[in-house]
Image: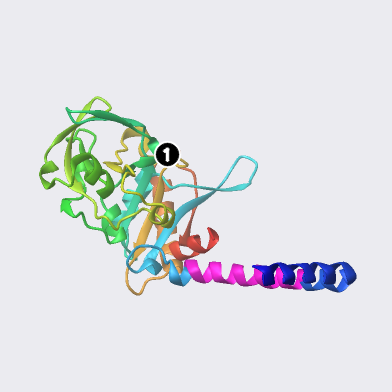
Amino acid sequence: MRWLLRDLSYSLRVLRRRPGSSTVAILTLALGIGATTAALSVINVAVLRPVPYPNPEELAEISMEVRDQNARVRSISPSIGEMRRWMSDTRVFSKVAAWAFGPTLVVDDGVQFERVRSLHVKLVTEQYFDMLGVRPDVGRGFTTDDMSDGAERVVLLGHGYWKRRFGGDRSVIGRVLNLKGEPTIVVGVLPRTFFQNQRELEEARLDDVQIWLPLRVTGLDMFKRGTSSHVSGRLRSGSDLQAARAELSESTNQLVQEIEGLAPATPELTSFSSLARQNV
């Protein structure tokens, strides 16, 4: 400790005697550290902490570019109707899915109840987990029938919530929970290693609540763009973003002719890897 204080005192005396050269040295050192930190951040995201899904280079987020009344281009989310057309017509995507944050819920299992914030409630379409390469640890995922408006209400539980609330009891499958006043059947539990994005992966705690519900959209809302939902797809092996963009544009143009009031739009795709680098 004595030697450290002596070195610190000597360094301060040198700084006072040669302020000019000292300033240049400090700035050079700061720039070097900053550049190194930025480079390591990119490497950390792109290599050491990749997107937490199998073959992330095949995943892309899909948005729509439209022109407003002032001819300005805006980027908005596709409609669920467009997503479903792409699901049925696509040759370049193996899976296409949508997700959105759900409402704040009161979960009642007949013994106790708790309020679950919207941030921890997710709504997804049936191909969402398959698109990300995720299978439930217990039970099943969502099906096309689960997305129907009149279908039985079902729910998937996050692994941490299942462990905390139900003690990891596998017999929870088939149990009826009351979610916001609606009887809802537990059909599956997601694996402990599944998180929707890198931030959730880094900040994961056992008591994080995750409630997953079907994203049901019907009627006039089916072709409403710019909602809170997000649409993504997994490219087939050998396909690329350019081919996918061309296919989605053709499909969208056909829909514009078929659906009254649906404005022309240009699909835009961004790879999950690029999104990860943008969030460094």
Q: Which residues are magenta?
A: 26-45
Q: Looking at the picture, how far across and down is residue 116, in whole percent?
A: 34, 34
Q: Which residue is mark 1?
A: 224
Foreground residue, 161 or 188?
161
| 255 sits left or right of 149 in the view | right
What is the quadrant of residue 211 in the picture?
A: top left
The quadrant in which the C terminus is found is bottom right
Q: Is residue 121 magenta?
A: no
| Mark 1 crowdedness (10 Å alpha carbons): few <14, some 14-19, many ≥20 | some
Q: Is residue 30 magenta?
A: yes
**Residue, x 12% and y 47% (percent of image)?**
170
The number of numbered badges drawn on the structure is 1
Residue 143 seen in the current view: no
Foreground residue, 102 or 234?
102
The correct choice, above or below, for 223 with respect to 11 in the image is: above
- Amino acid residing under circle 1: Lys
The correct choice, above or below, for 247 with respect to 255 in the image is: below
Residue 187 seen in the current view: yes
Q: Looking at the picture, how far across and down is residue 65, in whole percent?
A: 53, 51
Q: Looking at the picture, how far across and down is residue 279, in whole percent?
A: 53, 58
Q: Looking at the picture, how far across and down is residue 41, in whole percent?
A: 54, 67
Q: Secondary structure at mark 1?
A: loop
Residue farthest to the front? 2
Residue farthest to the top? 181
